[in-house]
């Protein structure tokens, strides 16, 4: 993209503007802001910029009469926000690759922008419909995918469309390029020791991730609700803690795989526990991994924090995906906060850290550490699948 002569050329730019909107007001514009460097580069190059994005799942939330809720799911408020952020006019098409789109493209000037209506207003989008993808491709001379958050989907506007452009007329945007490069940095020849911190509620959500990371990493630190499924599998009392009883065999298989590969899979030494799942309840800290009857584990304890922080400081590369406890509740947020601080401190001392999407990003942002780690991924599901070792359609379609 950097080497292309795009003066007067029509460039289709797929971005991820899937932002929270309430009563027509954007609640968090992070994803829009992240797209600005690519858009500004295209403006500088004098391209005629045609922007596509999805927003929500409009076909899953139809109005009582069976029609799309165009007020709730329209990208029009995003066009207005983008214009404000760029201090430039942004035209808006009321359809996507329909009559209004093509009429406005014909009038689009160099360095100007046209945002199209929600791609998911069309059932063909999520089906990867080749005919509709081909129609989308006729809108422009070049295609750029900057929507890493949707890279794991084989959708028309993210992957299928790219197959109608040759390698010289398609590329990653700056954000997508950074996501791919930083993912590759930990997946291909990482500096060692490599430590992964994996949290979250369920082992079932992270089975493939943990399995792949056992192959890749030297050490895996487990936290969050999923730790109790591992405890249960190991015959340790977990009280009323979150557990997936049907996944205990899988947990044992992961423990065994780590042993066979001579990798360290470390479980919490202690937990912060309470009788009730609420912020203002009384709590205490266990002496060891076992949780008393009628209590539930809601955060990692101080001994675990110390152990994990020490391991993080010894690591040259760090991957973090998932919180250590119920960090939305202040009383049970300390484990996640201390791990976030430990990752930031290690990064400042020269380690490379990748925050792998989802709640980990929310935690890093909550403690204002986003500028103290190496890279914060914008794509939860996409980064998860990349770290699981899967090929992402949105990436493969550009590279092919």
Image (tube, rainbow, N blue to C red):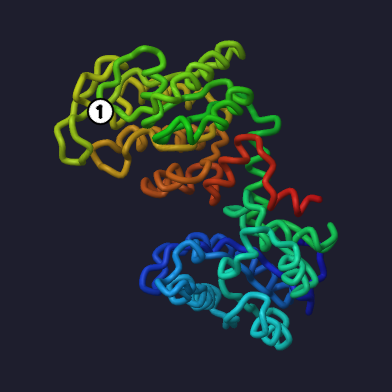
Vertical comparison of 164 with 8: above or below: above
Residue 99, by quadrant, is bottom right
Which is nearer the eye, 65 or 4?
A: 65
How many callouts does the rendering have?
1
Vertical comparison of 252 with 184: above or below: above
Residue 95, percent from left and from top = 60, 78
Q: Quick check: 225 left or right of 58?
A: left
Tell me which residue sits at (44%, 42%) in the image: 360
Residue 263, percent from left and from top = 57, 16
Residue 121, percent from left and from top = 56, 70
Vertical comparison of 77 with 18: above or below: below
Dot 1 crowding, Cα within 10 Å, few <14, some 14–19, many 20+? many
Which is nearer the eye, 283 or 55?
A: 55
In the image, farthest residue toward the front:
65
Residue 357, percent from left and from top = 51, 45
Q: Secondary structure at mark 1?
A: strand
Q: Quick check: 38 left or right of 302?
A: right
- The residue wearing badge 1 is 296
Which is nearer the eye, 275 or 3?
A: 275
């Amino acid at each position: 993209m950097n080497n292309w002569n795009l003066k007067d050329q029509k460039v289709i730019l797929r971005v991820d503007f899937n932002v929270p909107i309430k009563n027509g007001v954007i609640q968090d514009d992070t994803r829009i802001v992240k797209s600005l460097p690519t858009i500004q580069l295209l403006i500088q190059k004098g391209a005629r910029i045609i922007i596509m994005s999805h927003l929500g799942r409009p076909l899953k939330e139809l109005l009582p009469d069976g029609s799309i809720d165009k007020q709730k799911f329209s990208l029009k408020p995003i066009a207005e926000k983008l214009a404000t952020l760029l201090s430039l006019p942004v035209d808006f098409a009321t359809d996507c690759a329909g009559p209004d789109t093509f009429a406005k493209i014909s009038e689009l000037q160099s360095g100007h922008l046209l945002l199209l209506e929600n791609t998911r207003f069309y059932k063909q989008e999520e089906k990867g419909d080749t005919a509709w993808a081909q129609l989308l491709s006729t809108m422009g001379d070049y295609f750029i995918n900057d929507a890493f958050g949707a890279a794991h989907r084989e959708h028309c506007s993210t992957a299928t469309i790219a197959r109608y452009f040759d390698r010289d007329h398609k590329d990653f945007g700056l954000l997508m390029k950074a996501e791919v490069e930083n993912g590759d940095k930990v997946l291909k020849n990482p500096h060692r020791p490599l430590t992964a911190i994996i949290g979250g509620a369920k082992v079932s959500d992270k089975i493939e991730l943990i399995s792949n990371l056992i192959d890749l990493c030297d050490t895996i630190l487990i936290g969050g609700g999923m730790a109790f499924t591992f405890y249960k599998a190991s015959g340790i009392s977990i009280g009323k803690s979150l557990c997936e009883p049907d996944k205990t065999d899988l947990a044992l298989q992961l423990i065994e795989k780590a042993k066979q590969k001579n990798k360290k899979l470390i479980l919490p030494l202690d937990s912060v526990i309470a009788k009730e799942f609420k912020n203002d309840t009384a709590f205490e800290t266990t002496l060891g991994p076992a949780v008393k009857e009628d209590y539930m584990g809601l955060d990692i304890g101080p001994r675990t924090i110390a152990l994990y922080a020490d391991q993080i400081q010894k690591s040259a590369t760090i991957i973090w995906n998932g919180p250590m406890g119920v960090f939305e509740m202040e009383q049970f947020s300390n484990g996640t906060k201390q791990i976030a601080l430990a990752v930031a401190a290690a990064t400042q001392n020269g380690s490379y850290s990748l925050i792998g999407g989802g709640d980990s990003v929310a935690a890093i942002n909550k403690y204002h550490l986003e500028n103290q780690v190496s890279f914060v991924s914008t794509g939860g599901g996409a980064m998860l699948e990349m770290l699981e070792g899967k090929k992402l359609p949105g990436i493969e379609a550009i590279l092919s």
